[in-house]
Every structure is written in structure tokens, then in C-alpha cells.
Image (cartoon, rainbow, N blue to C red):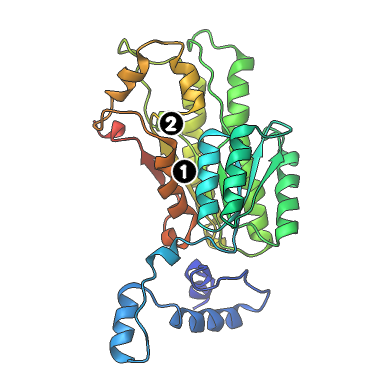
Amino acid sequence: MAALLRSPIFRYRSIVPKPLSRCNTASRFFATTIRAQSNLIGVAAALKAQSDPSLKPKATLFSEFSLDGRVAVVSGGKQGLGLEMAMALSEAGATVYCMDLQATPGAEFNATRDYVRKLGRKMEYVSVDVTKQKEVWDAVESIGTQEGRVDACIAAAGILNGSHCLEYKDVDFQKVMDVNTNGVLYTAQAAGRQMDRYKIPGSIILIASMSGSLTNRNQHGGAHPWVAYNTSKSAVIQMARSMACELGPKGIRVNSLSPGHIYTAMTAAYLETVPGLGDEWAKLNPLGRLGRSDELRGVVSWLASDASTFCTGSDILVTGGHHAW
């Protein structure tokens, strides 16, 4: 019975829409059981309606994806994939804080923020160096204090730097690891600490890459010189598994998302240095094209919401089938 009472199934926000109060465990058990009976979904709702004519049928699927009243933090949120994902969470109803290195955001962020505000949503920018643990922790703690909660986190800050594996300089290798691995850890820690502080069963999404599971081929059939990048993303995948196991008892879910070749400002800069490489990359997946940033909106919204409350410790591959060959 004690194990059942501690089970995160009784802490899902589809059952408890507000942070759990600091009541005793038994009281929390009975309160969540009562709420569960009034928040039936799926087949359970259909069966209840059959025996209770007063229960009015209603579609609930889209509401399961809703992030109304929730707060999210997104690192690497100034542009590219991070900003696209942040906008998706905003459209789903969340208040979103985008963190990035620059002191002020650029035109892409400003246009997106203004668009989101016209939708009645709130998106803010916070300047943070993700390679500095205390700075990240303090920034997210400030957000938690201001909003009274942190429900979702996307750790998307990342850089790409290449050199042959036998010639890779230690300082260059460490720079990639500091941002792509350490920075992701610090961001996840910062969000997790606020989720634990407010007793919120939140969702942490670590942005990895298919490069963490396979080695990217170049236009000549060899490997891209990305040993640091590939290593950093592989570490992120295992980081998500490890954190998921540690934080599961608190009801906090941790997953990684591994995109394939997505056309962004970062990949465009690299493609410009190798004429024809974009066409070669497109041939490497069954769909025969590069992905778009907006094609990740659905999966991050699912992972951040109550629609995925039994998904943790997973690496979600969105590669156009690249990994399926």
C-alpha cells in the first residue's frame, strides 16, 4: 500500500492540475482518487457514461495536450529549433521563458514573441550562459519564484564544431562538451530543482540528435569529423535515461529527442561550406528530404503535456526514417 501511495500515477496533472499541497500522503491519496473519478478520459469515460446517464460525453484528446496555466523554460531559445519548440509550447498555453547566451535577442525572437503575445500568450527572454551551472540554476530559480512553478523544460542549447578525430584540439572538444552536454545537464538540473521545490510532476526534454546513436556520413561515404558533437549527443541520450530513473519517484519525467537532418541556421551554415551536401543528406532517409523545424512541434508538445504521462527514459527519434535503413 505504501508503494502505491508513492506512485507518480496519483500525481499526474491530468488528475491534479495544481501543485500538490504539503499534506500528508494519505490525504493526498484520497484527494487524487476523488479527482481521478471526475477526470475520466478514453474508454473509462465511455464506460462511465453508459452506467451514468448524467455524464455528458465530451472530446478530451486536445485538452490532454493543453499546457494552459503552466510554465516552461527553453535553453537555446533565441532562434532555430529552440525558438520553434518554445513557440509550440506557447501555442499550447504555456508561459515560456527562452534562455540564450546573447544579452538581447534578435529579430527572429522578437517577431515570434510579438506574434505569441497577439495570441494572448507570454514569452520572455533571459540571458544565460548554460555552461555556468550556478547562473543557470539561479535564473530558473528566479523564474520559479516569480511564477510559483516550473512545469516543463526543453534543453536545446547546442553548438557544432568539426575536426578530424586524430587532430581534435582539447580546447575545441571541451567547448562542444561544455555547451552540448554540461549545459544540458545544468538546464535539466535547474528545472528539476524547481519541479521538486513545488512538488510538480514535470517534464524535462533533452535535445540530443540521431548523431548520438549513429555516425553521420559525408558526401563521399565517409564520416563527418564530428567526434565531439556525436559524443556530446550520445551523452545526452544516456543522461536522459539516468535522470529519468532518479527522478521517476518524484513523478518527474525525462526524455531525449533526437532529430535527424533538420534545416536550421546552424545546419545551413555548415551546408554552405560543402556544396551539394544538402542533396546528399536528403537521400539518406526514406522521405528523401531534410526536415523542417516545425516538424518537431508535435512531439515536444506531446512530451511536455499530460498526453505522455507514462513516457520517460525514452529517446524519441524524428529522422525522416534515416535510422531505419
Q: 190 or 270, which lies in front?
A: 270
Q: Position of residue 258 (x, y in %)?
A: 42, 37
For label 1, count other residues whose C-alpha is less than 10 Å away and answer few (under 14), some (14-19) or many (20+). Answer: many
Q: Are marks 1 and 2 in contact (CB under 8 Å)?
A: yes
Residue at 64% x, 57% y: name it. 150
In the picture, the disc for residue 212 is 2
- Is 38 in front, or is 66? 66
Amino acid type of the residue that numbered disc 2 sits on in the rendered structure: Gly
Mark sitting on residue 277? none
Q: Residue at image x 71%, y 37%?
A: 128
Q: Is residue 303 above or below residue 102?
A: below
Q: Is residue 265 above or below residue 128?
A: above
- Could you tell me which quadrant the C terminus lies in? top left
Direction from residue 239 to residue 282 in the image, left or right: left
Q: Tag 1: residue type?
A: Ser
Q: Secondary structure at mark 2?
A: helix
**Is residue 319 visible to us here?**
yes
170 vs 109: above or below: above
* Residue underneath mark 1: 256
Neighbour tally class for label 2: few under 14, some 14-19, many 20 plus, Cα within 10 Å: some
Q: Is residue 182 visible?
A: no
Location of residue 59 (image quadrant)? bottom left
- Counting residues from the start of the chain, the first of labels 1 and 2 encountered is 2
Mark 1 secondary-structure assignment: strand
Q: Quadrant of residue 178?
A: top right
x, y percent for residue 216: 37, 22
Which residue appears farthest toward the front when viewing the image? 118
Direction from residue 88 to residue 50 in the image, left or right: left
Q: Position of residue 205 (x, y in %)?
A: 51, 47
> Residue at 38% of width from left, 23% of height from top?
215
Front residue (pair 8, 245): 8
